[in-house]
Amino acid sequence: MIIFDLFPNGKTKAVTFSYDDGDRNDAKLIEIFNKYGVKGTFNLVSGWVGLSDNFLSKSEVYDISKTHEIANHTRSHQWNERIPVDQMIMQVAHAKSTLEDIVGKPVLGYAYPNGQYNNELLTVLKGLNIAYARTAGQSNTFAHPSDFLLWTGTCHHDNAIPYAKKFVSLSSYSQLPIFYIWGHAHDFARRDNWNVIIETLDILKDDNDKIWYATNFEIYEYLTAIKNLRITSDYKCVYNPSCISVYATADGEPVEFKPGYTILK
Ligand SMILES: [Zn+2]
């Protein structure tokens, strides 16, 4: 029997962050994330990159992309579900290509400006090969998304502290729990409450031997790799068609399924 209860390197829980808009306060948040060894996803409005000193510059975005994820938050932060479909396509495609020019790799994540979407926009995102998209809701759980294009995080950072306490006390029965926190760094500045994120990270730190800190895309990639495994009915051979390893427990022992075939004893 194979139980999928491990994240990369034998970790049993995952934490991920998603922050929108790309204004100057992101740089301060990234400093905090780097100090704690935490990874984040930063959803940028392509038309605002380098627009003024209030926003991240292209070179800052490139530097951030080496450790964290850069994702798509449209060209100009329109209410995307309310505009003509060709404009909707241009909003998403412009941000995708502009950000890809800066970071030098595919930009596959998206966050809905103002949290708004409709079926037409979902079709556009699929057509542009967007891998996942984040809403502005709260699931209030550590569950996996049933649809990555409607990925709703656990909570906004304003509510993160009680969930962080709950997360570190989870029993091993909870299989691959994901704590997903989202927000806007400018809210910390506006409300002068940077302590919220620091207290959240301090609570999680006590559980660091169990926690995999990952970008949104890394979580998407890992959960998708699990789903794509092909396993013989006798559990003796596992085929992993993805380009990353999948970790699991087989007959009570941790195993790594590298890309390709793994024969189990
Ligand atoms: Zn936004």
Image (cartoon, rainbow, N blue to C red):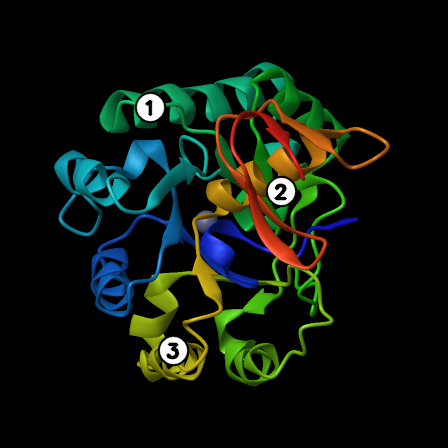
> In the image, 147: left or right of 112?
right
In the image, taking residue 9 as reference, residue 143 lies left or right, namely right
Foreground tag (3 vs 1):
3
At label 1, counting other C-alpha atoms closer than 10 Å, the crowd grade (few under 14, some 14-19, many 20 or more) is few
Q: What is the x, y in percent for residue 175? A: 70, 62
- Compared with 27, 62 (above or below) is above
Tag 1 residue: 105
**Does residue 173 show up?**
yes
Residue at the outermost right position: 233
For the point 49% across and 69% down, the residue is 210
143 and 43: which is toward the camera: 143
Residue 84 appears anywhere in the view: no
Task: Indicate the amino acid at tag 1.
Answer: Lys
In which quadrant will I find the C terminus? top right
CB atoms at circles 1 and 2 under 8 Å apart? Answer: no
Q: Earlier in the sequence, mark 1 or mark 2?
A: 1
* Amino acid, disc 3: Lys
Categorize mark 2 by other alpha carbons within 10 Å: few (<14), some (14-19), many (20+).
some
Residue 165 versus residue 185 in the image, above or below: below
Mark 2 to mark 3 CA distance (whole Å) = 24 Å
* Residue at image point 17% right, 41% down: 63
**Which quadrant of the structure image shows residue 125?**
top right
Q: Which residue is mark 3?
A: 205
- Please state if 102 lies on the left or on the right of 211 as rendered: left
Closer to the chain start, of discs 2 and 3, is: 3
Circles 2 and 3: CB atoms closer than 8 Å: no
List the residue tagged with mark 2: 223
Q: Secondary structure at mark 3?
A: helix
Amino acid type shown at disc 2: Leu
Q: Which label's residue is closer to the chain start, 3 or 1?
A: 1
Secondary element at tag 1: loop
